[in-house]
Amino acid sequence: MFYLGVDIGGTSIKGGMVTKDGKLFDTFKMPVIKNEEPEKNIKKLVTLIEKFIKDYNYKKEEIVGVGVGVPGIIDSTHGIVTYSGNLKWFDLPLKKILEDSLGLPVKITNDANAAALAEAKFGLGNKYKSFLMITLGTGIGSGIVIDGKMYAGNFGKGAEFGHSLLVMDGRQCSCGRKGCLEAYASATALVKDTKIMMELHKDSLMWKISEKYGAVSARVPFEAAKERDPYAIELVDYYVKCLSEGLINYFNTFRPEAVILSGGIAEEGEFLISKIRNYCQEHDYGIKLCPPVDIVKSLIGYDSGKIGAAALFID
């Protein structure tokens, strides 16, 4: 039997087939068209899944179910995307639409909850029984695992750490509030800051690096910082400060065994994570008075959203 996992992000939708032991194979991907009606995006996804099943010669009776991770506030009990700020989806009955179209059982959850579930079942869950998962992508997602079990809050709408307050009356966030952590420490925020810094400093190495990639992305300041570009170093240091201050709030609220970082920015690995560790050790009063919190990169990494979504159907 197989489990189909779908990871819906702010810029793309990714999916693949997963085995009961968490192995991913036969994947697919499609872009998310900004400002397009959500039903149109979902219709394209249904067409892609149907083609995927046919192309790889799967039989629907072999597929236990389709798990879907979606960014934002998700009513997993009723299968509704209540609000996804980066996608601009409101009260979307995603479970019903997919079940009616595919003829397969569907479960949905927050995308970071899916990533946390994957890590708990098939990744670092063997080492940590209580941890926080933070996904660093278009937005900032989060998941909570306590004593090996997911905690998602009432109707599955909890653990929105990206929308905890970092700066009172600060930057506008996609959720409607001002000063959220996501407005400072997401990939979207970092790209905006990078573009501003590049315009201020035409001599920055970030111009050459962005030309190499064809666009300004979150990887640009990190790559330039590794080459000792002073403006990129300033950007990275500010990013680390913002993210770390948010993490310290979570340390002192939950005191988990670990915070596990996932998503595109987390792929910077030790170059980023070592800086976060150093900042937290210098600024968190709890480090000296409480059990330490490990700060580590996801073991599963890029595929955690897909695998965790599929794991909604894996006992």
Image: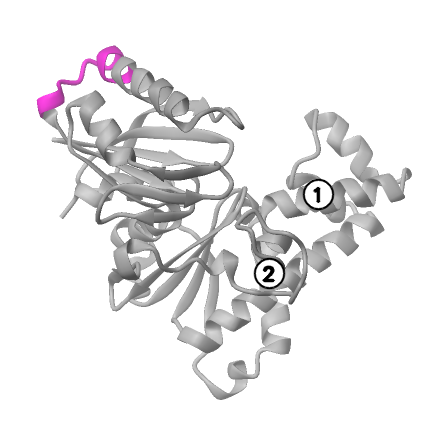
* Residue sitting nearer the eye, 9 or 42: 42
- Percent across and percent down for residue 186 are 58, 49
Magenta-colored segment: predominant secondary structure: helix
> Horizontal placement of 206 versus 127: left or right?
right
Q: Residue at x 25, y 28 (%)?
A: 97
Which residue is denoted by mark 2 in the rendering?
243
Q: Judge whether residue 178 is colored magenta.
A: no
Query: In front: mark 1 or mark 2?
Result: 1
Q: Residue at x 16, y 44 (%)?
A: 314
* Residue sitting nearer the eye, 206 or 34: 34
Q: Quadrant of residue 281?
A: bottom right
- Label annotation for residue 58: none
Q: Judge whether residue 59 is colored magenta.
A: yes
- Percent across and percent down for residue 100 are 19, 25
The amino acid at mark 2 is: Leu
Q: Residue at x 29, y 28 (%)?
A: 25
- The first of marks 1 and 2 along the sequence is 1
Q: CA distance from mark 1 to mark 2?
A: 16 Å
Name above or below for residue 205 compared with residue 259. above
Q: Quadrant of the N terminus?
A: top left
In the current view of this chain or complex, which residue is farthest to the left? 61
Say which element carries label 1: helix
Q: Which residues are magenta?
A: 52-61
> Horizontal placement of 283 versus 81: left or right?
right
- Label annotation for residue 192: 1
- Percent across and percent down for residue 106 are 20, 35
- Percent across and percent down for residue 20 are 17, 40
Q: Is residue 142 visible?
A: yes
Name above or below for residue 142 compared with residue 22. below
> Horizontal placement of 312 versus 292: left or right?
left
